[in-house]
Image: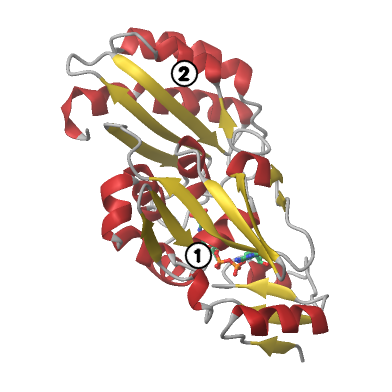
Amino acid sequence: MRQVSLPRTLGELWAVLQRQPHSAVYAGGTDLFVKIRDGQLNPESLVCLERLTELQGVQDNGDELFIGAATTHSKLIVAESVREHLRVLVKAASVLGSPPIRHMGTIGGNIVTASPAGDTLPALYVLSAEVEIRHCEGSKRIPINEFIIGPGTVDLAKGEILAGVWLRKHQGWNLSHYEKIGRRKAQACAIASMAAVLELTETGKVKRARLAWGSVGPTVITSEGVENALIGEQLSLEVLKNAGTMLDKAISPIYDIRAGADYRRMVSKAMLLRLNDYACGTTY
Ligand SMILES: Cc1cc2nc3c(=O)[nH]c(=O)nc-3n(C[C@H](O)[C@H](O)[C@H](O)COP(=O)(O)OP(=O)(O)OC[C@H]3O[C@@H](n4cnc5c(N)ncnc54)[C@H](O)[C@@H]3O)c2cc1C
């Protein structure tokens, strides 16, 4: 039987982690317990982060929002400040798993799992999120694309935890879109996904663009080539098709049980083309 610790303060957490350096931390457990049950992981003991108030909820800190790592997807989706400033993240978290998974699973767990299919990750990349890492002697902030090193691998040392994620509030994007292609509507890992934020002029010209794809490379894929092909152009199918040729060079999809590499390439470009529909009225 494994010991489970439930610290209520960061002081208690650091003490537990010092006493039990080989324990695994968890929040909702929706990734960790699947891996333990499958025999992929066998930690000596477990430390639950759920009761730490410092890791819970969304704080408005002037120009930035801080989302605590143990904030569940359900809570994130309804937070007023997140809905107002980070629409692409709301859209991504809203299609993650299913209601029970969104009630249990947390943004911190999604980030640390670092799955190429993680739904919040493309949204966090296009919003230039920074993660806050804490240890018993202090904390540091690093960009999310430096924190996620590879599939399932993040830059987190023993005794460190992810405290949360920092995002700038007024980013000026007036088109926010997240789409995922899965084998069914709910509880489906992404075969491919795309997050996009654009700043369009009143006449529909692209002033700025950030795009990121999930499940088509070892980590989230971004492409300056695609973004540059959009900037300064009137958004249209033609322009998006042209930008799609740049995407081919950026992505490196694999064949797995969910889909083939060619299919992933095709739908990645199709999601890009669909931005035209959004720009044409419905989802500004
Ligand atoms: C049926 C099912 C469907 C799913 N569908 C989706 C889906 O559609 N899209 C998707 O992206 N994911 C999906 N998932 C995966 C999972 O639900 C999400 O990744 C979720 O956000 C994980 O959060 P958690 O709090 O449950 O993570 P946990 O299981 O608690 O932790 C996951 C990992 O992160 C570490 N960790 C957690 N919090 C911290 C922290 N603060 N600091 C340091 N390390 C930490 C743990 O040690 C562990 O390695 C699904 C899972 C299941 C079981």
Q: Is residue 44 left or right of residue 36?
A: right
Q: Are marks 1 and 2 in contact (CB under 8 Å)?
A: no
> Visible in this render: residue 20?
no
Looking at the picture, how far across and down is residue 51, in whole percent? 52, 82
Q: Is mark 1 within 8 Å of ligand 1?
A: yes
Q: Is the residue marked by circle 1 packed among few (<14), some (14-19), or many (20+) residues within 10 Å?
A: many
Helix, strand, or loop for circle 2?
helix
Q: In this picture, is 96 found above or below 117?
A: below
Towards the viewer: 104 or 206: 206
- Residue 47 placement, left or right of 75: right
Residue 56: give x, y in percent of width and height.
Answer: 46, 71
Q: Which residue is mark 2?
A: 227
Nearer the observer, 235 or 155: 155
Residue at (55%, 25%) from the top-left corner? 265
The first of marks 1 and 2 along the sequence is 1
Which image quadrant for residue 278?
Answer: top left
Residue 106: image tag: 1
**Viewport quadrant of the N terminus:** bottom right
| Residue 263 vertical placement versus 133 (above, below) | above
Q: Secondary structure at mark 1?
A: loop
- The one nearer the camera, 164 or 116, is 164
Residue in view at x 45 percent, y 10 percent? 229
* Quarter containing the C terminus: top left
Identified by mark 1, the residue type is Thr
Alpha carbon separation for disc pair 1 and 2: 30 Å
**Residue at the spot 47% in from the left edge and 35% down from the top edge:** 126
